[in-house]
Image (cartoon, rainbow, N blue to C red):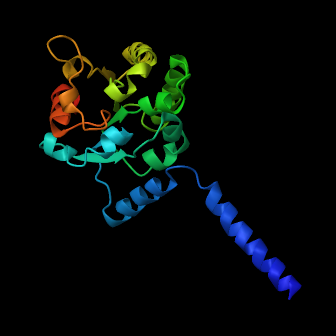
């Protein structure tokens, strides 16, 4: 009886430990895999990778008629998560273009984080993309100014500037700056294009993004 109890406790511990080992966003990645199995992803699509600003853009295809888009944004993700799940986010697809929006959660996760650290994380992910897709278009959407994260804007702005400089030197790459388009006539960010959380966008906010992004879309 004692041996049976010991074996049972060991099994419970093993199950609990295996569950604890699953990294954050593991389930999101499994959901992507399941979706790809049920609906094989098309070739030569535009692949969106990033955080909740993409996740919540569930009707993104409606904003870009005639474009084939695969949305692989998962809410709350950081550039560290994109690097961790890089194989899962890239290997199932054969896109003609990748557009990335990620970085603001890195700063939100650690308010003391230096801009260069986030830039380095982005460069690492960009390298992973280029190792798999050396010649496709790769674009980065600037970290947006969110009223709820106003105190983090100096670091975000610095990161934007450094990533923009990096992307300018890369072939088949663009930095898509959405900052000015989200401002009013006085140069202040438009709060009416944000949801009540002052972080995520309304349909009008996404309309503005779409207008800025359209010239870059393959």
**Where the N terminus falls, by quadrant?**
bottom right
In the rendering, at what x and y percent does residue 163 appear? 42, 18
Q: Please, is residue 166 above or below residue 38 in the view?
A: above
User: Which residue is at 40% across, 45% downward?
Assistant: 75
Q: Please, is residue 36 above or below residue 199 in the view?
A: below
In the rendering, at what x and y percent does residue 198 appear? 30, 33
Closer to us: 206 or 32: 206
User: Which residue is at 50% across, 18% downward?
Assistant: 115
In the rendered image, the residue lying farthest to the left is: 65
Going by the image, does 218 lie left or right of 171?
Answer: left
Closer to us: 15 or 65: 15
In the rendering, at what x and y percent does residue 19 appear? 62, 61
Q: Please, is residue 190 above or below residue 132 in the view?
A: above
Closer to us: 153 or 35: 153
**Where the C terminus falls, by quadrant?**
top left
User: Which residue is at 42% across, 29% downward?
Assistant: 104
Closer to us: 172 or 55: 55
User: Which residue is at 33% across, 45% downward?
Assistant: 55
In the rendered image, the residue lying farthest to the right is: 2
Whether residue 213 is visible here, answered yes or no, is: no
In the rendered image, the residue lying farthest to the bottom is: 1
In the rendering, at what x and y percent does residue 141 appear? 32, 27
Going by the image, does 26 lie left or right of 151?
Answer: right
Whether residue 34 is visible here, answered yes or no, is: yes
């Amino acid at each position: 009886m004692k041996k049976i109890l010991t074996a049972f406790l060991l099994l419970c511990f093993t199950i609990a430990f295996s569950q604890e080992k699953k990294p954050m966003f593991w389930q999101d990645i499994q959901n992507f895999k399941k979706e790809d199995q049920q609906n094989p992803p098309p070739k030569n699509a535009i692949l969106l990778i990033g955080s909740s600003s993409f996740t919540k853009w569930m009707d993104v295809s409606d904003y870009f008629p005639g474009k084939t888009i695969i949305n692989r944004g998962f809410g709350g993700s950081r550039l560290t998560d994109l690097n961790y799940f890089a194989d899962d986010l890239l290997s199932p697809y054969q896109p003609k273009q990748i557009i990335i929006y990620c970085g603001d959660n890195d700063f939100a996760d650690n308010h003391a984080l230096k801009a260069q650290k986030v830039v380095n994380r982005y460069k690492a992910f960009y390298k992973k993309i280029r190792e798999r897709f050396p010649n496709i278009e790769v674009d980065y959407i600037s970290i947006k100014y969110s009223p709820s994260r106003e105190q983090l804007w100096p670091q975000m702005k610095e990161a934007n500037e450094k990533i923009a400089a990096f992307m300018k030197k890369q072939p088949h790459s663009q930095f898509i700056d959405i900052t000015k388009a989200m401002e009013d006539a006085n140069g202040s960010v438009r709060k009416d294009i944000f949801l009540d959380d002052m972080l995520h966008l309304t349909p009008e906010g996404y309309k503005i993004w779409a207008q800025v992004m359209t010239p870059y879309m393959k």
